[in-house]
Amino acid sequence: MFSLYYFVFLVIVGGLLIGGALTVSRAVMANLVTDKNQNLGFSYFNIIERASVIIGSLIWGAISSGLFNLDSMRYQLALAMMVIIILAGLTFLLKMKKTENS
């Protein structure tokens, strides 16, 4: 059904998208933090980024394995939970107080 070429194509496209997202997220972080506090800001950014990978994976795994009797509906619920978490983070980001870089 799926060929090796299709898989390799998807891996390359996924890698490009993830690489772009990581680059943009660091650029946004550099604009959010003042020049004086960049070391502290990037430290928190790295800690939260790594924690979100662990917590997001645990939530996805708990929903998709804990609700095994719901068949494919469990993946839709897990995806909905990820969307809720992203929207909560976006809401927090939009409510941040803007400061001038000094």
Image (cartoon, rainbow, N blue to C red):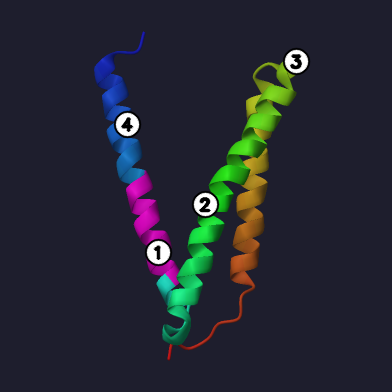
Q: Are marks 1 and 4 in contact (CB under 8 Å)?
A: no
- 54 vs 78, nearest the viewer: 54
Q: Which residue is mark 2?
A: 50
- 81 vs 62, nearest the viewer: 62
Q: Secondary structure at mark 3?
A: helix
| Position of residue 60 measured from the top left corner of the image (x, y, whole percent) | 63, 34
Q: Is residue 97 visible?
A: yes
Left or right: where 11 falls relative to 54: left
Q: Number of marks in the image?
A: 4
Q: Is residue 79 visible?
A: no
Residue type (three-letter) at the residue carrying disc 4: Val
Q: Are marks 4 and 2 in contact (CB under 8 Å)?
A: no
Q: Quadrant of residue 91?
A: bottom right
Q: Is residue 28 magenta?
A: yes
**Residue with the most extreme top position:** 1
As measured in the structure, the alpha-carbon distance from the residue carrying label 4 to the one carrying label 3 is 31 Å
Q: Is residue 14 above or below residue 52?
A: above
As measured in the structure, the alpha-carbon distance from the residue carrying label 1 to the one carrying label 2 is 14 Å
Disc 2 versus disc 3: nearer the observer: 2
As measured in the structure, the alpha-carbon distance from the residue carrying label 4 to the one carrying label 2 is 22 Å
Q: Which residue is mark 3?
A: 69
Circle 4 residues within 10 Å: few <14, some 14–19, many ≥20: few
